[in-house]
Amino acid sequence: MVFSSLFFVFFFFVICMTVCLTRKRLRAQNITLLIFSLLFYAWGGPILLLLLCTVTFICWLGGRLLGTIELRFHRKLVLTITVAACVLIFVFFKYTNFLADILKPILGFEGVVPQIVLPIGISFYTFQLISYVADVYKGDTEAQQSYWTLLLYAALFHQCVAGPIVRYSDVAEELAHREITLSDFSSGISRFAVGLAKKSLLANPCGALAATALAAKGLETASAGTIALGTICYMLQIYLDFSAYSDMAIGMGKMCGLHYCENFNYPYVSRSVTEFWRRWHISLSTFFRDYVYIPLGGNRRGLKRQILNLFCVWLLTGLWHGSSWNYVLWGLYYFVFLVLEKFLLKKETAPPPLWKRLLQHAGLLIVVWFGWILFYFEDFSLLATAVSGLFCGNGNAFWDLNARLTLLNNVFFLAVSIIACLPLIPWLKVKLSELSSSNNAWRWLEQTTDALAPTVLLFLSFLSLIGNTYNPFLYFQF
């Protein structure tokens, strides 16, 4: 079940919110959320629900033990065993087939390794629970005594499948004491409507264009223009798709009185790779910083150790995204650029001139664009064909009728998609708010826009989703 399906929007979530809002006691609201979250997760397979409950139980027990043990050695032992158990389960389900493909030629094994189904969201809820145990160990949060409350935290259907990675300390108080306000509920509806529209009206068509342009069957003969347009569409799709999921998760959380962290901050406006990763998938970046980079020593143990720590972080970042070598390559690709920026580029003490800012921005977009090409093709032969085709290395044309028609037929749509990746609309909202503070006409326009925009977006999304068979969420696979 995906957030952008008509069944979820007009049946599952409506019933969940109706039951929640008619429960006066917080305990009853939490029970409702837990039941619907378990139903949502079991939709992908009841056996996978057992896995979620098992990992949660391991971390709940580890947290309880850490809450009672005082000796440092014993606390480290409990932390190590708990985290190791979670990681082993995670590796078994996500990387067994990948590791088997690596080891089979080395060991001379010729048998068939059974394909293991990847549980949806396992990367997200595993990292959330590991962060909970680590925070209890560090004393940043108290151990949760109730298994069911911790299970609610791990299983909340708003964000357990594709993030953001919500830390327990950020929502612990709200799980125990919260109130659903009219302001939060209204803001949540607006945020959900924006996410749904971003997904159904923009991300899905971008994905369809990318899939057509980069199809394996015609990739070798595709013109450089077709490949370039396809990769640009994928670059737009992956941001619009993942940020749309985060928008919907944050919006649904607000409607329930829960406030999740922001996960995207318009990363394509960045001027450096470092800035890009401060804006892209913020919850994952901060997780690796706080629970991998800093515990390894960060930048406190000399230059060589810092580079090694960065290497470990970006190797794990690549592997986290998928059990394929292209993801490893993608992670190490960013490692190289981050090291170059950190140690070779001088830090600017004054704002650079406009021409230099534009040049930095263009360079960043090229780096990110090529990174998404590495990310898209799991098959290295197809990756080589695509990269070669960009430079007409396959004997292909630079530009052809197909590229021309694709661009002309979608130029307006692509322009809107690009605008959606920029902070233009938030900037206009701020300006409108400033004008409305001193003028009744502007105030009326602001209030009318705030009231009508969610309705219009939901209606357009509904029309788009009817009969639409292309409706994946890219990050469900991670």
Image (cartoon, helix red, strand yellow):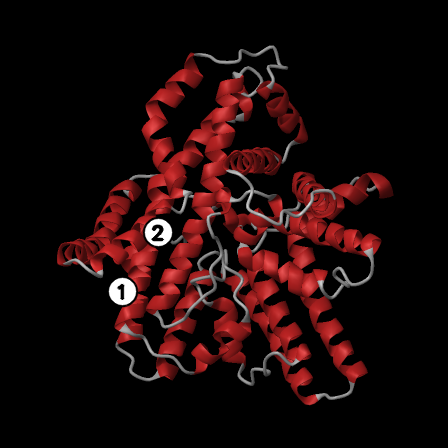
Residue 427 seen by the camera: yes
Q: Is residue 241 left or right of residue 169?
A: left
Residue 312 position (above or below residue 181):
above
Q: Residue at x 44, y 58 (%)?
A: 43
List x then y, in percent, for residue 313.
70, 54
Q: Nearer the viewer, residue 81 or 274?
A: 274
Q: Is residue 179 left or right of residue 80?
A: left
Q: Residue at x 67, y 66 (%)?
A: 86
Q: Which residue is mark 2?
A: 426
Q: Nearer the viewer, residue 354 or 273?
A: 354
Q: Quadrant of the N terminus?
A: bottom left
Measured in 3D between alpha carbons, the distance from the residue under mark 1 to the one under mark 2, in whole angstroms, is 17 Å
Assess disc 2: are there few (<14), some (14-19) or many (≥20) residues with their C-alpha within 10 Å of its C-alpha: few
- Mark drawn on residue 35: none
Provide the secondary structure element on which disc 2 rests: helix
Q: Which residue is mark 1?
A: 186
Instruction: Report the amino acid beneath label 1.
Output: Ser
Residue 470 seen by the camera: no
Q: Residue at x 57, y 49 (%)?
A: 275
Assess disc 1: are there few (<14), some (14-19) or many (≥20) residues with their C-alpha within 10 Å of its C-alpha: some
List x then y, in percent, for residue 311.
75, 50
Kindly give the residue lying farthest to the right in the view shown. 107
Provide the secondary structure element on which disc 1 rests: helix
Residue 121 position (above or below residue 34):
above
List x then y, in percent, for residue 427.
35, 50
List x then y, in percent, for residue 349.
62, 50
- Report the mark closest to the observer, 1 or 2: 2
Instruction: Report the amino acid beneath label 2.
Output: Pro
Q: Nearer the viewer, residue 90 or 413?
A: 413
Q: Is residue 5 left or right of residue 153?
A: left
Q: Residue at x 44, y 63 (%)?
A: 157
